[in-house]
Image (tube, rainbow, N blue to C red):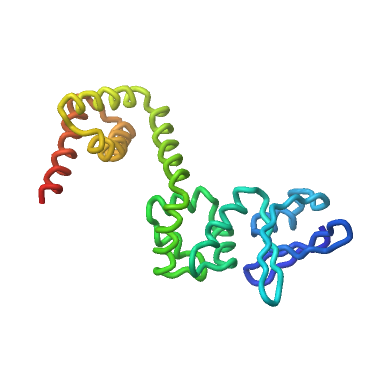
Amino acid sequence: MVELWQINQKFFVLINCQGLGYEIQILESFFLKLKTNQISNKNITLWIKHIKKEDSDLLFGFTSKEQKNFFIEILSIRGVGSQISMGILNKFSINEVINAIKTKNKKLICSVPGIGQKMSDRLILELKSKFKNEILLEEEKSKDELEIKNPEINKMMEDLQLTLQSLNYKNKEIKIIFPLLFKEVDLLAKEGNNLSFENLLKLAMNYLDKDSSNLAR
């Protein structure tokens, strides 16, 4: 590394590679680690994305392949430039962005400079399609974490699923209400309330009956 500098919310490093100096825009988190000597600045490895323009060649450096690929995916969306893509990764981790997409958190997306309501809608819509596997994985992780914390409730939920199936409720219907049940059950557990299987079944059927009523309308 030869030099570090910042221009507004852009962060740069000049790297000497076999006698040639390369000016690379990096993320703020990596910039601060270099600046405060938290990591060695002698041997730096970066995943580079090269963007060629009519009047310049731009280099963007990332500390992981995942960051670089995520940057490229954001960049592929119409109307989103390199600085907005960098702004998103400067402000949030990849998991935080994926969670915002999953929950359609427009307020969080709009907190990035340069992103308005229309662009946030476009980002959520297109990134949801691009990262559907990652979103499903996060949902499974959340479910697993809840199951590990509450093994007794997990067993009760398994029994509940079998009971609802025997009552001719469809798997699709059961799958929709389970996240709602997990939240309510977890809240009751935190409050120290005991929950019987009978109460859980009644709660589940109330949700299912409501959904059926909405569909009938």
Image quadrant assignment for residue 192: top left
Q: How many marks?
A: 0
Say which residue appears at 49% left-offset and 53% top-offset: 97
Q: Position of residue 183 (x, y in %)?
A: 31, 39
In the image, is 44 to the left or to the right of 122?
Answer: right
| The N terminus - image quarter | bottom right
In the image, is 74 to the left or to the right of 147?
Answer: right
Q: Position of residue 11 (x, y in %)?
A: 68, 64
The answer to whether residue 59 is above or below residue 69 is below
Please name whichever residue, 109 or 64, is drawn nearer the observer in this view of the structure: 64
Please name whichever residue, 1 or 36, is drawn nearer the observer in this view of the structure: 1
Residue at the limit of the structure toward the bottom, as seen here: 55
Say which residue appears at 69% left-offset and 56% top-offset: 48
The answer to whether residue 45 is above or below residue 83 is above
Say which residue appears at 80% left-offset and 53% top-offset: 41
Q: Position of residue 147 (x, y in %)?
A: 39, 29
Say which residue appears at 70% left-offset and 58% top-offset: 31
Image quadrant assignment for residue 188: top left
Q: Position of residue 175 (x, y in %)?
A: 28, 36
